[in-house]
Image (cartoon, helix red, strand yellow):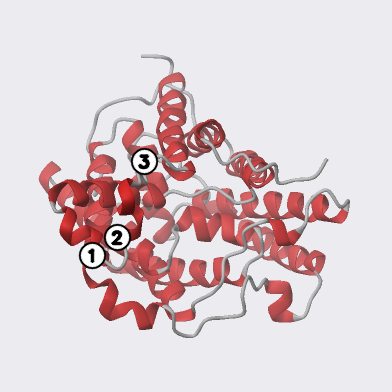
């Protein structure tokens, strides 16, 4: 048996989405107060959840490729467009600092009854329409400084994937160790 | 209302999230996302209001070309699932409650205004980087793509700066 299985339909989307939303809410990532507290370095839930997830998924993909049931060429690896990738990330970071969420977490926050999460989602739609309005003049910037197609950190640094995984695990563990005392939610007054 | 239970330990939540993300790669070949759904909704909504303008638009036009419906896509089904999953999780853990969250001293109108402005910046930004915290930051980084980590540098860099500048608002 080889993966991916090519399930691109509604059921596959719903199953992945339900699990994704369930875990985000139970992990506390639908709470805008908690998300912004991470940006003030008062709560490390976002960092710890996100980096653990990246490492587990990356480790899983590594093993599936190692045993030969999955090929790197069959999975989607995004390409860097240096300015667009950085600028888009920065706008989403500012958006979280100001509005409390990012696109996915606003859906989670809204589903748990937060009206600010619903309004944030409406803002996303307006933001997309504003982007479409200026797309043609800014298109050259969006495509500028393109990196190699589907480049990985291993390609960039000339290291094997296991070494990259080891370094990232070290970084995640180090950050967790130095911030473990502020990992508790003393700064958060909003319920999850 | 069910008994309120605290959130999961962050590393446990992260490990489960990593397995869900891996499942997405195994089923579909790509990771999880979010911003594709508001993009599809924007295309459909704008097409209802002003079809001629949208169909001539360089970004949204192809999505609604020839009667196409971008809402019938994996990503919008997935985001619908996110809402359902989060609703169930909030309900079963006793956290489902209608409220307006935000900076402690801000009025409800102030909180909703901040949410709207933040949403607009985020929606615009997600189209600039062609992916958001889920699609690029989480899923991209899980493939060890350089793009995922470049995104995270921009996201946390600007986010931390905003967090520092707005810290008084949260006292």
Name the chain letter of the residue that bears numbered label 3. Answer: A
Residue A116 point in image, percent of width and height: 24, 42
Answer whether residue B108 is visible to the viewer in this image.
yes
Question: At x 35% / y 31%, what residue is drawn?
Answer: A112
Crowd rating for badge 2 (residues with CA inside 10 Å; few <14, some 14–19, many 20+): some
Question: On screen, B145 above or below A141?
Answer: above
Residue A107's tag is 3
Residue B88 falls left or right of residue B162: right
The residue at the point 80 percent across, 45 percent down is A2
Residue denoted by label 1: B56
Residue B25: horizontal and vertical position, in percent?
65, 47
Q: Which residue is mark 2?
A: B61
Residues at marks 2 and 1, common chain? yes
Residue B155 as seen in the image, left or right of residue B52: right
Q: CA distance from mark 2 to mark 1?
A: 6 Å
Asked if disc 2 and disc 1 are in contact, CB closer than 8 Å, the reply is yes
- Circle 1 chain: B
User: Residue at horizontal 40%, vertical 51%?
Assistant: B36
User: Label 3, label 2: how many angstroms apart (C-alpha)?
Assistant: 26 Å
């Amino acid at each position: 048996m080889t993966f991916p299985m090519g399930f691109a339909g509604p059921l596959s989307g719903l199953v992945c989405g339900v699990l994704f939303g369930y875990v985000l809410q139970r992990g506390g990532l639908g709470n805008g107060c908690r998300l912004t507290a991470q940006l003030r370095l008062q709560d490390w839930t976002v960092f710890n959840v996100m980096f653990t997830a990246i490492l587990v998924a990356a480790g899983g993909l590594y093993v599936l490729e190692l045993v030969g049931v999955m090929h790197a060429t069959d999975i989607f690896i995004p390409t860097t467009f240096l300015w667009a990738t950085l600028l888009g990330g920065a706008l989403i970071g500012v958006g979280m600092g100001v509005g409390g969420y990012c696109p996915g977490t606003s859906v989670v926050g809204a589903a748990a009854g937060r009206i600010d999460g619903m309004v944030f989602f409406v803002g996303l739609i307006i933001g997309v329409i504003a982007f479409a309005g200026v797309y043609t003049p800014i298109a050259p910037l969006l495509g500028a400084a393109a990196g190699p197609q589907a480049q990985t950190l291993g390609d960039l640094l000339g290291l094997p994937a296991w070494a990259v995984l080891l370094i990232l695990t070290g970084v995640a563990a180090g950050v967790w160790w130095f911030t473990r005392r502020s990992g508790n939610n003393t700064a958060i007054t909003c319920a999850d | 209302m069910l008994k309120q239970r605290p959130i999961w330990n962050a590393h446990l939540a992260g490990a489960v999230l990593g397995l869900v993300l891996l499942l997405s790669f195994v089923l579909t070949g790509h990771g999880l996302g979010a911003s594709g759904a508001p993009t599809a909704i924007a295309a459909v909504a704008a097409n209802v209001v002003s079809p001629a303008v949208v169909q001539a638009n360089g970004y949204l036009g192809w999505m609604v070309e020839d009667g196409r419906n971008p809402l019938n896509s994996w990503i919008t089904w997935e985001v619908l699932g996110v809402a359902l999953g989060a609703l169930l999780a909030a309900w079963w853990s006793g956290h489902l409650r209608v409220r307006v969250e935000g900076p402690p001293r801000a009025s409800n109108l102030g909180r909703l205004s901040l949410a709207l402005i933040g949403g607009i910046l985020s929606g615009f930004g997600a189209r600039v980087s062609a992916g958001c915290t889920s699609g690029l930051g989480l899923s991209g980084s899980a493939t060890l793509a350089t793009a995922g980590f470049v995104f995270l540098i921009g996201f946390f860099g600007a986010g931390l700066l905003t967090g520092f500048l707005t810290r008084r608002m949260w006292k």
